[in-house]
Amino acid sequence: MDQMTSACGEANKLLAMACQPAEVIVLVEIPSHIRFWGIDSGIRHSVGGADYGSVTIGAFMGRKMIKSIASSTLSRSQPSANGLIVDELEDDSVNLIKAEASLDYLCNLSPHRPSKHCKLPPVQMSNFQPLKKSVLEQLSSIIAQKVQKEVGVVAGVKNEVRKLESNFQAIQAVLADAEQRQLKEESIKRWIDQLKDVSYDMDDVLDEWSTAIAKSQMKVNDEHPRKTIKKVCSFMIFSCFRFREVGLRFHVAREIQTLNDRIDGIVRVKNMFHFKLSEGGPNLPERKITASVIDATEIKGREKDKGTIVKMLTSESSDQEPALRTISLVGMGGIGKTTLAHLVYNDHEVETYFGKRIWVCVSDPFDEIRIAKAILEGLNESAHDLNELQALLLRIQESIRGKRFLLVLDDVWNEDSTKWEQLKNSLEHGCLPGSRFLVTTRNKKVAGIMGSSSTDILELELLSLDECWSLFSQFAFFGKNSRERENLEETGRKIAASSKGLPLAAKTLGSLLRFKRSRAEWESVLNNHVWEIKEAESKLLAPLWLSYDDLPTEMRPCFLYCAVFPKDYTYERDTLIKLWMAQGFLRETQNQEMEVTGGECFEALAARSFLQDFKINKDDGSIIECKMHDIVHDFAQSMTKNESFSVEIDGGTAESKIDSFSRDARHSMVVFRNHRTDSFPATIHSFKKLRSLIVDRYPSSMNAALPNLIANLSCLRTLKLSNCGIKEVPSNIGKLIHLRYVDLSWNEIKELPEEMCELYNMQTLHVKYCSELETLPDNIGKLIKLRHLNVVHWSDSSFVKMRGFEGLGWLRELDEFHVSGSGEGSNIGGLKNLNHLQGSLRIKWLGDVKDPDEVNKAELKSKNNLTRLHLRFGSRIERGIIRDDEILEALEPPPNIDSLKISDYQGIIQVLPSWINKLRVVELRKLGKIENLPPLGKLPFLEELSVDSMESVRKVGRGFLGMEVAAAADDDDDDSGIGIVEMTASPSPSNTVIAFPKLKSLHFESLKNWKEWEGEGRRNEDKTIMPSLRSLLISDCPKLKALPDYIYQSTTLQKLEIINAPILKEQFKEGGKGWPNISHIRSVTLS
């Protein structure tokens, strides 16, 4: 017993606990002085003996004895791949696990029923995702494939698992009919909600189990280094000194039994609905959808209306007209009011006529303060410090004084004239004649209240059949050849007619059929019985449902998740993908990461017109941001009625508004508008099933409310509390074991608690723009699933201690890494294992590196997926003898870098490294010792160049062009301090040397001492300079006297901006001596 007591002490005294009769004991590491343990119902017996391989082991298991000779058994047996073999020794269900000779035996006899040991141990449940396909379609396969692996080893559970599988298969057979009938039968909608509820609860149980396994593995690895890991199979992650996990296994078993009881009831109700069975057929793989966005400016059907509105907006005002004329677009939902308003807003004539254009989505309710703030933001004015209407109105008056503006108020519902008058009166004061309001509304009465006369109201009519066909065709036949079009046109015209004159319906149907090429597929859409639904909104319901129903099943939850956000919300593509990941909607395969899958899903939703109003990345044409049509949003909300909600809080209405939603809700966004509140609404604590909580700009501090909030919402996967006045994150956040996404940006946090490192499932952590943040947790490396970490701050002087990054090998995104040379943070070698980093990386405080060998340890060259690199030097400590140029030379960035920014650099670059040849974007900022710019004209792929805040630059000579290498190298007057090694000019086919052959954008900013920009002086047919230049900016260069001749001679330059350069401004003003040299440039700005 002394041996036993000693062992129990080493294992937190948990070995002495009586185990349940059905317990299964897995292979574990046993202390060297203990030969064998047998545990069953309080009977514990230790058998001592000689060394391994020679002892005859016996263990009392209740009243049974198992005997075996280790040496003879192991010599006869062939170990399996994971080192385990299962022998069923007797028919009475005694199982013995044997392992490698270095380990001992554990065996168990269940008094009640067999406990089958599997050769493969339990695996993590990272892929169990309710609604990953359709909630319901995936359950059968998940239960069959995943649940058995997790809990099938627990006695008595296998039958329950089989029962679950059988029930879900029966349900799956009727899902297609059920999901369509829910559109018009509320009872079926409730039945589906119950089924979703069970699937969510199943996910919670299994995620808890999976997380416990991961934690145990981490602790085993921490407490037993590699020597132990080699002994114990990596899959067998429970150890005998962690028997608190045993209770969890039985908790899982009990939960599955409870879920089965609930499913039994759901199946009984199913039989009452007499659903149609789904037709069997081959399970074809989903087609991958990749598509470009169709340009909205090409949409047909509203050309005449657009011309009418443009004329009304830009016509000169008469004396009889009001100071501010209001034009209103009126029509039913989906008829194209907002689309038409966008086309008008972006029209070139309108853009030229109005000095300022502002777009505000109003919606319901009409919130004057929110609208006033949106107007100020549209005028590029800050409104964060103002919460009173009068103060906002005064600032608006100041901002519009002397300007002619266009204010678009989209989706107005307000019928209270008093709410509008105060805002309107304020806008009338100070603006120039010709300013206009453009209002879109479904209600003609609202148009009158907003100030439109009868002649200023344009009621949009339904599109004609030909117009519907034209709009439908624009989407449906995109990418199809003439033969396909001819084959599909007859069916297509019938489908287009079903849009009933509504542009949104025609666009949605066209987008749906864009990816279908056979006549059978088109006819299936035409003949779908969803067209038979007679509800008032069916004109749009049927097209939206057909498009939704055609989505690949794994994309449906991604679309429906968008309903948690309010109308007119701006969705950021990358953020939305991370939120989908957190909810388990995206699968990672061997060949494709979750982020890539999420990008394909986003593109598919955009291509099907579920998303619109795209903001496009000018570099690669990808979508950065978008919005969702309010009717599409209504449809998504109707499909998630009790599952998600967004609520806007105005003053004291918080508790009552939140209290009106179902307690079964899983996702919530709470938006606080303008007014300060005494406390965070405690009602939210009662929504204990929430998986997402997103709070937008809580106007007070959430410090007091946060601990209780966390304690009550234990199911959270997503917690987004940006800009909520948080100063301290409570330690109990470590108990939110399901958390995958945490955003604490724009708060006043100084540090994150170490307990956050217990969140083993964490994928995304944002602490951006936390001005007080000083350190990340020392054990952050325990977040082994972390993929995205954002710590960027607006201040160049910010510093955050970053230690323990060596364990973050799966990190894909790290916006900043802070180097410390004083031992308080991380040395740059902490980047060594982060070889999955993608996109952009900024390394700060490189000037604090004490030894260039440290830089080599970062192994930047191994991070092949990085494309943008910002090297910020500067130092927080007293600089040693190491020079910046030594550090830069040692860095050796990865080969795929196409964008490089260097700032606060105090060295002299001796050699242009070979990797610089591939750069497309270069930014040089605060290079204090560089007097003349390097020969960047030799870079063959350079498209954008920015030079900023370089006080020592007095002259930009011909060496900048890189066309005369020898001369530049020998010319003392033009010594840039940068040698040139094996860099050749960019020849054209005619042997003409080209400087900056692809440069499109050139910016010079804050070069306070720059006086001369040297030109060529005479034309040279063998030389071409900047043949692709489109834009030139010169800002805050007060001493610059002239531009070089090759700028005057440019035939491609379209935009010239000269700001705070008084000598140039005087020279190039209209009528000035330099005006003829630039008068051919399309856009010239002098200020």
Image (tube, rainbow, N blue to C red):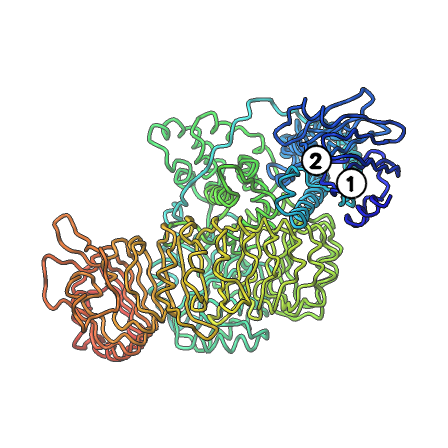
According to the picture, the residue beneath numbered tag 1 turns out to be 34
Q: Quadrant of residue 850?
A: bottom left
Q: Is residue 431 left or right of residue 451?
A: left
Q: Residue at left 59%, top 54%? A: 781
Looking at the image, residue 399 sits to the left or right of residue 207; the answer is left
Res. 308 visible in picture? yes
384 to the left or right of 341 = right
Q: Residues within 10 Å of mark 1 (few under 14, many from 20)?
A: some
Quadrant of image for the C terminus: bottom left
Kindly give the residue lying farthest to the right in the view shown. Answer: 63
Q: Residue at x 82, y 33 (%)?
A: 22
Q: Quarter-wise, where is residue 67 in the image?
A: top right
Identified by mark 1, the residue type is Ile
> Residue 349, relative to residue 541: is it above or below?
below
Specify the label residue 870 is tagged with: none
> Where does the image place residue 11, in percent across and percent down from the top left?
77, 48
| Cβ atoms at labels 1 and 2 below 8 Å apart | no
Q: Is residue 682 above or below residue 635?
A: below
Q: In the rendered image, which residue does mark 2 sit on?
A: 103
Please name whichever residue, 847 or 569, is drawn nearer the observer in this view of the structure.
Answer: 847
